[in-house]
Image (cartoon, rainbow, N blue to C red):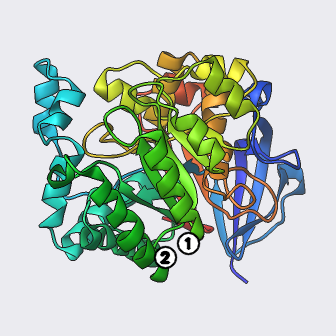
């Protein structure tokens, strides 16, 4: 039996002490800790933990964590890390005053990424995505969702999803795949969008389902993208193939995306930069998880989702990176937590729960990931010597992560 013992831990952070996983309202500021403890890992899972006085006296591998925190690894529930090239030119255009919507109308944005991806080989896409995946793993991410959506043709969407499947096969990180053929309307269908939607429903979805390439179906339900009626049609078609909903909603406007997501039993509705009391009330009466993406707001210089209000109203939130080439070219979750705290006015504990246990729940992994508990997968972060979790968020310019374990093995 393989075993690893982490000893002399200054503080074990994120211990699960309750039966349910997802944290809401005031619970989001509650993070259970244990000072001067140990964690025993056997066969890739957390076998035991507790005070150092109860630590076993031997293991095959021993890691000394004196003066260090041990945290559950991050769970990033919304990313687009399979793409062909960056969009730094559009970034400079935005600095010159061109809006994100104007760029999209001229064939930039998502359509720009689609044009580049369609002519990029599957192997090249895999190699670049694997490099990004390795990067975020080194920064502490232990579970991740990856979307298609930069293909916008049947063959290119399938190509993206095959890349995600290959990443699943060749990486220790837990990966969920989302089919996002409804990310934008290709220019050739701009005047006849129903034709493209029919392709999504009648060509793409059957092949995605037949090849078992996706866990979820996503739709960009927002101003200038997909309407509520179109979204509802696509999600219902996806459900007939066993694909659950996880959608983009209300990034650019109050679009009805939240409500159509809830009506289709979406696991999560993501973005929510534009959200009002009606949407908050609807979410409170549902099991759909609101997911906010603060680094997107930072990079596009747009308003942030009202995370403070949402938590104060009793909602729980997940927080994800939205790692993509156009609106959030970063998978750095410690930096994301700083954005969330500084610009959304939430507390470090709330941000921590948003990127650990609540993020795990948005991936339907709450029973196995996102907190420290006996029997959970041993995906752990060992920090450098720092005084507290608050300090990690406060000192945002420094890399505080020393070691990462996935499935109990050092990465």
Nearest to N terminus: mark 2 or mark 1: 2
Residue 250 visible within the image = yes
- Left or right: residue 124 versus residue 8 is left
Mark number, residue 209: 2
Examine the image and state in which quarter residue 121 appears. Answer: bottom left
Asked if residue 78 is positioned above or below residue 253 in the image, the reply reads below
How far apart are the two marked residues, 2 and 1, measured between alpha carbons? 6 Å
Q: Secondary structure at mark 1?
A: loop
Do the numbered discs 2 and 1 sit on residues whose CB atoms are within 8 Å? yes
Asked if residue 106 is positioned above or below residue 264 in the image, the reply reads above
Image quarter where the N terminus lies is bottom right
Q: Residue at x 13, y 58 (%)?
A: 116
Mark number, residue 241: 1
Percent position (x, y) of residue 198?
35, 63
Q: Residue at x 50, y 30 (%)?
A: 272
Q: Residues within 10 Å of mark 1 (few under 14, many from 20)?
A: some
- Left or right: residue 132 versus residue 188 is right
Q: Residue at x 71, y 18 (%)?
A: 312
């Amino acid at each position: 039996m393989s075993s690893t013992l982490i000893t002399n831990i200054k503080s074990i952070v994120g211990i699960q002490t309750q039966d349910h996983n997802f944290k809401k309202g005031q619970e989001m500021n509650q993070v259970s800790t244990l000072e001067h403890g140990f964690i025993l890992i056997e066969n890739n899972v957390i076998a035991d933990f507790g005070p150092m006085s109860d630590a076993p006296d031997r293991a095959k591998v021993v890691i000394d964590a004196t003066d260090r925190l041990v945290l559950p690894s991050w769970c990033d529930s919304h990313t687009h890390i399979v793409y062909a090239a960056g969009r730094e030119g559009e970034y400079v255009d935005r600095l010159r005053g061109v809006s994100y919507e104007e760029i999209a109308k001229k064939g930039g944005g998502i359509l720009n990424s689609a044009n580049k991806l369609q002519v990029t080989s599957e192997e090249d896409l895999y190699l670049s995505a694997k490099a990004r995946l390795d990067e975020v793993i080194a920064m502490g991410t232990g579970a991740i969702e990856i979307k298609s959506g930069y293909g916008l043709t049947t063959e290119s969407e399938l190509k993206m999803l095959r890349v995600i499947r290959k990443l699943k096969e060749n990486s220790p990180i837990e990966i969920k795949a989302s089919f996002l053929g409804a990310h934008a309307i290709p220019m050739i269908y701009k005047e006849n969008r129903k034709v493209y939607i029919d392709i999504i429903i009648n060509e793409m979805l059957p092949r995605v389902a037949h090849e078992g390439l996706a866990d979820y179906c996503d739709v960009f339900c927002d101003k200038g993208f997909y309407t509520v009626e179109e979204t509802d049609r696509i999600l219902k078609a996806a459900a007939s193939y066993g694909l659950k909903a996880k959608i983009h909603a209300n990034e650019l406007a109050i679009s009805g995306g939240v409500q159509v997501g809830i009506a289709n039993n979406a696991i999560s509705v993501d973005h929510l930069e534009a959200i009002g009391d009606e949407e908050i009330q609807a979410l409170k009466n549902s099991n759909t998880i609101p997911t906010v993406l603060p680094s997107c707001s930072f990079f596009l210089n747009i308003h942030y989702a009202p995370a403070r209000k949402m938590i104060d109203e009793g909602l729980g939130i997940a927080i994800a990176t939205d790692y993509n080439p156009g609106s959030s070219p970063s998978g750095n979750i410690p930096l994301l937590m700083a954005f969330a705290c500084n610009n959304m006015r939430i507390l470090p504990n709330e941000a921590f729960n948003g990127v650990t246990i609540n993020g795990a729940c948005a991936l339907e992994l709450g029973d196995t990931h996102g907190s420290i508990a006996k029997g959970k997968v041993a995906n752990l972060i060992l920090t450098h010597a720092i005084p507290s979790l608050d300090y990690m968020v406060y000192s945002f310019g420094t890399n505080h992560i020393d070691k990462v374990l996935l499935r109990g093995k050092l990465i």
